[in-house]
């Protein structure tokens, strides 16, 4: 009797222990970390099938519950890198990588778990379509275009992926192509081409700088021409002669100075003249004034860099015409232009002709007149 009661108590103890163990193992407390969404589901203890219960957005927890579990899906944006080695349209093998930024849409964890593979959604549903889109885009381009038009190719790949995953839990944020590696001979050719392009840019910058400096010189020359015209119009021979007399007076009043005045005029007054009778002020003609106004309007008022070269040519032609007119006034024959295929004659070694407006030397070459002493005794009058 005692043995039977002991056996019964032992059986009850074992049953209670088993019940407590089963109960403790069936109680769960699933948690969802930050940036994740949890797919909470129920699994029966003995019979039945799994059932979806709710969605939790982390950080969160269901608390102690009966047989509840969760599948946590990271909903934050991530960048997935794929390496490629493909043939381009010109049959050149290149290596590169594609970095794709993808984010799962909020509140779509139930669809992701049940329809898109849960935690394996990228490997099962996105990876191969992504690689296929990249192969199609790259195979249609030449190798040099992949180097220079990476943004365009990446945009085409992203457009294809966005169209494919429209109205799905998957959102394609961006696609970037990087780390492009060409075969060694082709890479050297590309480097030479880039270096040549940079050299051409440098030469273009130097040309632009030279043209800008030429424009400044033309503007300065026009300003000088305008200033000289104003001065020449305001000065007269009598006024210049008057200023010379004032200078002579100051020289005569200085000490230890000797001034000798030699007659150089027909009336024998002995007053040196600054301008001879042959010297005349040249006045601008209507054609000269029109050309000067045109240059002023072009380079000072509304100057443009594109007209520099043409204007330099016009200035050269105008200078040639002016020289021809000047030689005609002096009675000299015009300078014949020699053909390019004939050598130019040797220049004459004769002294150049004196300009017409230079006063003649009043003292002959064989004049034996004694020179004025460098210094006179004190008290001598000039």
Image: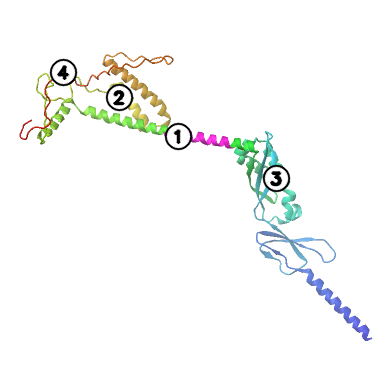
**Quadrant in which the N terminus appears:** bottom right
Mark 4–mark 3 CB contact (< 8 Å): no
**Quadrant in which the C terminus appears:** top left
Mark number for residue 130? 3
Q: Magenta region: which residues?
A: 191-209
Report the residue at 17% width, 28% height from top.
240
Q: Look at the picture and state if 349 lies above or below 89.
A: above
In the image, farthest residue toward the bottom: 2
Q: Which is more N-terminal, label 3 or label 4?
A: 3
User: How far apart in space, not on screen, are marks 3 and 1 (Cα)?
Assistant: 47 Å
| Residue 374, quarter of the rendered image | top left
Q: Could you say whether the residue bearing mark 3 is in a helix, strand or loop?
A: helix
Q: Which is more N-terminal, label 1 or label 2?
A: 1
| Residue 15, quarter of the rendered image | bottom right
Residue 68's spot in the image, x, y percent? 76, 65
**Residues packed near mark 2 inside 10 Å, few (<14), some (14 to 19) or many (20 plus):** few
Q: Which is more N-terminal, label 2 or label 4?
A: 2
**Residues packed near mark 4 inside 10 Å, few (<14), some (14 to 19) or many (20 plus):** few
According to the image, label 4 marks what residue?
366
Select label 2 or label 1 by which is in front: 1
Select label 4 or label 2 by which is in front: 4
Mark 4–mark 1 CB contact (< 8 Å): no
According to the image, label 1 marks what residue?
206
Q: Nearer the viewer, residue 204 or 164?
A: 204
Q: Could you say whether the residue bearing mark 4 is in a helix, strand or loop?
A: loop
Residue 351's spot in the image, x, y percent? 27, 18
According to the image, label 2 marks what residue?
289
**Residues packed near mark 1 inside 10 Å, few (<14), some (14 to 19) or many (20 plus):** few
């Amino acid at each position: 009797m005692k043995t039977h009661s002991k056996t019964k108590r032992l059986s009850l103890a074992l049953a209670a222990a088993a019940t407590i163990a089963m109960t403790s193992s069936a109680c769960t407390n699933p948690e969802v970390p930050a940036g994740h969404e949890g797919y909470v589901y129920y699994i029966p203890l003995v019979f039945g099938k799994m059932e979806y219960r709710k969605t939790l957005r982390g950080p969160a927890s269901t608390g102690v519950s009966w047989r509840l579990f969760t599948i946590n899906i990271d909903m934050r944006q991530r960048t997935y890198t794929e390496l490629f080695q493909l043939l381009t349209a010109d049959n050149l093998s290149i290596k590169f990588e594609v970095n794709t930024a993808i984010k799962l849409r909020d509140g779509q964890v139930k669809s992701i778990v049940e329809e898109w593979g849960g935690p394996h959604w990228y490997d099962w549903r996105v990876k191969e379509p992504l690689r296929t889109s990249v192969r199609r885009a790259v195979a249609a381009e030449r190798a040099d275009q992949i180097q220079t038009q990476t943004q365009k190719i990446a945009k085409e790949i992203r457009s294809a992926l966005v169209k494919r995953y429209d109205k799905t839990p998957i959102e394609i944020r961006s696609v970037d192509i990087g780390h492009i590696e060409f075969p060694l001979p082709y890479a050297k050719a590309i480097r030479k081409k880039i270096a040549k392009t940079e050299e051409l840019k440098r030469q273009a910058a130097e040309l632009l700088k030279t043209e800008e400096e030429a424009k400044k010189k033309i503007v300065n020359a026009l300003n000088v021409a305008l200033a000289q015209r104003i001065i020449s119009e305001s000065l007269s021979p009598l006024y210049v002669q008057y200023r010379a007399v004032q200078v002579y007076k100051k020289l005569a009043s200085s000490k230890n100075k000797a001034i000798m005045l030699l007659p150089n005029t027909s009336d024998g007054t002995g007053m040196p003249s600054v301008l001879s009778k042959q010297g005349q002020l040249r006045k601008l003609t209507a054609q000269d004034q029109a050309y000067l106004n045109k240059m002023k309007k072009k380079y000072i008022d509304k100057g443009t860099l594109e007209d520099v070269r043409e204007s330099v040519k016009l200035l050269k032609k105008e200078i040639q015409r002016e020289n021809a007119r000047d030689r005609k006034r002096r009675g000299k024959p015009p300078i014949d232009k020699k053909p390019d295929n004939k050598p130019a004659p040797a220049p004459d070694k004769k002294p150049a002709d004196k300009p017409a407006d230079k006063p003649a030397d009043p003292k002959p070459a064989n004049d034996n007149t004694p020179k004025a002493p460098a210094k006179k005794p004190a008290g001598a009058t000039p």
